Amino acid sequence: MTLALGVLASGRGSNLQAILDACARPGFPARVAVVISDRERAQALERARAAGVEAVWLNPKDFGDREAYDAALVRELEARGVGLVCQAGWMRILSPVYLRAFYGRALNIHPSLLPAFPGLHAQRQALNHGARISGATVHFTDEGVDTGPIIVQAAVPVESGDTEDTLAARILTVEHRIYPEAIRLFAEGRLKIVGRKVVVNPEGRG
Ligand code: GRF
């Protein structure tokens, strides 16, 4: 049985696409069971439908508060037997209701070398700071913003003349590589959270 993924995406969904493409490769140990968005017109939902994956719009306006929304999110994920949730450009803050259900089974991707430049506009932050190197990070989700235990990182040079868009595009190409890599490590049972660190077992399960 391959690992069932739930992908949460608010927008364009290029990371979702990278995950869908990885899952389509022979031997990849995961499949996307459902894609959920908080935005009706998210391109991510179209990408899911095009790949024959269930696409669910969960409208925040239908719920009284964040906790009620997250409880519905958890119900949707659990109803499909999701074993790992991948936040891929998910723009809503997630409450303890979500983390109680999925801590240790929820990943996020961020376009910087954390702990540098968390939060919004990471590429702009890197440029404004004069960083020579930035990159991307896949980490377990915790209660903070981009603070959880780090699984995979990749460095990307900042070039003179870079704009937010050119740097973002260069970082995206490595995001598309490292997100599937982190999913594979999780699916193969090779990740263990120890305090704030992730230990990667080179052997895998069994
Ligand atoms: C990516 O840069 C990701 O790291 C950040 O939001 C962006 C989402 O892009 N969290 P996409 O929707 O996957 O194309």
Image (cartoon, rainbow, N blue to C red):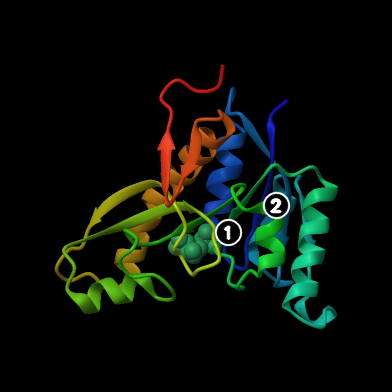
Name the residue carrying label 1.
13
28 to 119, vertically: above or below: above
Crowdedness of circle 2 by 10 Å Cα count: few (<14), some, many (20+)?
many
Amino acid type of the residue tagged 1 in the rendering: Gly
State whether residue 106 appears in this view: yes
Crowdedness of circle 1 by 10 Å Cα count: few (<14), some, many (20+)?
many
Amino acid type of the residue tagged 2 in the rendering: Ala
Q: Sequence-wise, which precedes: disc 1 or disc 2?
A: 1
Real-space Cα separation, disc 1 to disc 2, in angstroms: 9 Å
- Secondary element type, mark 1: loop
Which image quarter holds the N terminus? top right
Q: Quadrant of residue 165?
A: bottom left
Residue 189 screen position, x and y as percent: 56, 30
Residue occupying the point 77% across, 56% down: 55
Left or right: 135 in relation to 206 = left
Q: Residue furthest top?
A: 206
Residue 142 screen position, x and y as percent: 54, 60
Residue 159 screen position, x and y as percent: 17, 63
Mark 1 within 8 Å of ligand 1, using the beta carbon: yes
